[in-house]
Structure formats: C-alpha cells, structure tokens
C-alpha cells in the first residue's frame, strides 16, 4: 500500500555562526576604541593635605599656566565652556556628569581660575571639584 502522509521534517534552524562573528568583531571594536578614548594630559597639580580620589563619570576642565583651557582634552575658550555647561545642564540628570573636575596648573593666574569657577557656578552646577596632587606624592618626589 502507498502511504500518502507526508513525513514531518524538523524546521530548519538558522545558522548563527555569522551572527557570532559579527558580535565578536563588535566586541573587539569597542574594546579597542575604549582604550583610545581614555587619553588625558599630564599636569603638575598643586598638592593638598586633604586630597581624595574621585570616581565616577566626570567632566574635566583643565586650566594651564598660560591660560589655555581644555575640556575633556579638547582646546576651548571661556565662551565654548559656557556653551558646553549650558548644553550639559539641559540634559537629563542621568546623562550629566557626576563631577566637574577642575585641574588648574599651580602657575595659572587666579583671575583665570576664578572665571572658570564662576562660570561653572553660574550654570548652577554644585558638583565642582578642584583637583590637587597628593602631599604624599610630593614628599616622595622631593626625597629623590
């Protein structure tokens, strides 16, 4: 007798090998790009007894001895800083930096320093932290 019933075949499952290849390539891309974005400038900061480490997401403002300003390693002017702070204040709280870290060179003019501090406070940021070097590091260097 002839059987007219069809054999039930298993549904074909998609091949996920190309998907895994793409995922690993993206993973490698993001790991490598994270290494390149973690750049900064070395500055000689004034020492302080009460220096503490800061963790979390922060916006870094650097004031050099010659008055040059940098925000997250990009050269800016005071007007640019005002616009950056204004745009940052308009973002939702979750997207704003936890700290605004001001790194001023010891030889920087007090007037320039106060302008930056005033600009940050004018934009209603109360999370300004003034970066310093640690007294311990300075003592270790002076003993060499």
Image (spheres, rainbow, N blue to C red):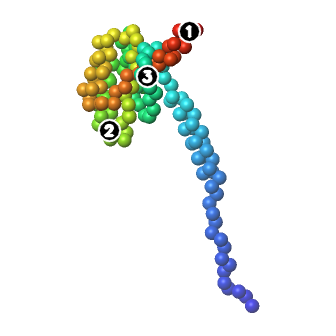
Mark 1–mark 2 Cα distance, whole angstroms, equals: 47 Å
Determine which quarter of the picture holds residue 27. top right
In-front residue for pair 17/5: 17
| The residue positioned farthest toward the left in the image shown | 122
| The residue positioned farthest toward the right in the image shown | 1
From this view, report whether residue 47 is shown above or below residue 38.
above
Residue topped by disc 3 = 51
Residue 113 seen in render:
yes
How crowded pointer 1 is (Cα within 10 Å; few <14, some 14-19, many 20+) is rated as few
In-front residue for pair 76/124: 124
Q: For numbered disc 1, what is the local secondary structure? A: loop
Q: Which mark is residue 91?
A: 2
Mark 1–mark 3 Cα distance, whole angstroms, equals: 20 Å
Where does residue 63 sit, x and y in percent of width and height?
Answer: 38, 16
Q: Going by the image, does 144 lie left or right of 56?
A: right
Residue topped by disc 1 = 143
Is label 1 in contact with label 3 (beta carbons under 8 Å)? no
**Residue at image x 46%, y 14%?**
44
Determine which quarter of the picture holds residue 12. bottom right
Q: Please state which of the two labelled residues, at mark 1 or mark 2, is closer to the viewer.
A: 1
Where does residue 137 sit, x and y in percent of width and height?
Answer: 51, 16
Q: For numbered disc 2, what is the local secondary structure? A: loop
From this view, report whether residue 142 is shown above or below residue 22.
above
Is label 3 in contact with label 2 (beta carbons under 8 Å)? no
Look at the image and tell me in which quarter the C terminus lies. top right
**Residue at image x 33%, y 30%?**
127
How crowded pointer 2 is (Cα within 10 Å; few <14, some 14-19, many 20+) is rated as few
In-front residue for pair 144/65: 144
From this view, report whether residue 113 is shown above or below residue 120.
above
Q: Looking at the image, tell me whether mark 3 or mark 2 is earlier in sequence order.
A: 3
Look at the image and tell me in which quarter the N terminus lies. bottom right
Mark 3–mark 2 Cα distance, whole angstroms, equals: 30 Å
């Amino acid at each position: 007798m002839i059987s007219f019933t069809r054999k039930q075949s298993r549904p074909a499952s998609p091949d996920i090998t190309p998907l895994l290849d793409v995922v690993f390539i993206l993973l490698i891309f993001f790991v490598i790009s994270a290494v390149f974005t973690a750049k900064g400038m070395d500055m000689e900061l004034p020492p302080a007894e009460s220096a503490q480490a800061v963790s979390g997401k922060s916006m870094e403002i650097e004031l050099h001895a010659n008055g040059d300003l940098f925000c997250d390693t990009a050269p800016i002017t005071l007007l640019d800083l005002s616009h950056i702070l204004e745009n940052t204040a308009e973002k939702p709280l979750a997207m704003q930096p936890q700290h605004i870290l001001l790194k001023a060179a010891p030889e920087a003019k007090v007037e320039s320093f106060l302008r930056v501090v005033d600009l940050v406070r004018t934009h209603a940021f109360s999370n300004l932290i003034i970066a310093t070097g640690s007294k311990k590091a300075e003592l270790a260097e002076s003993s060499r």
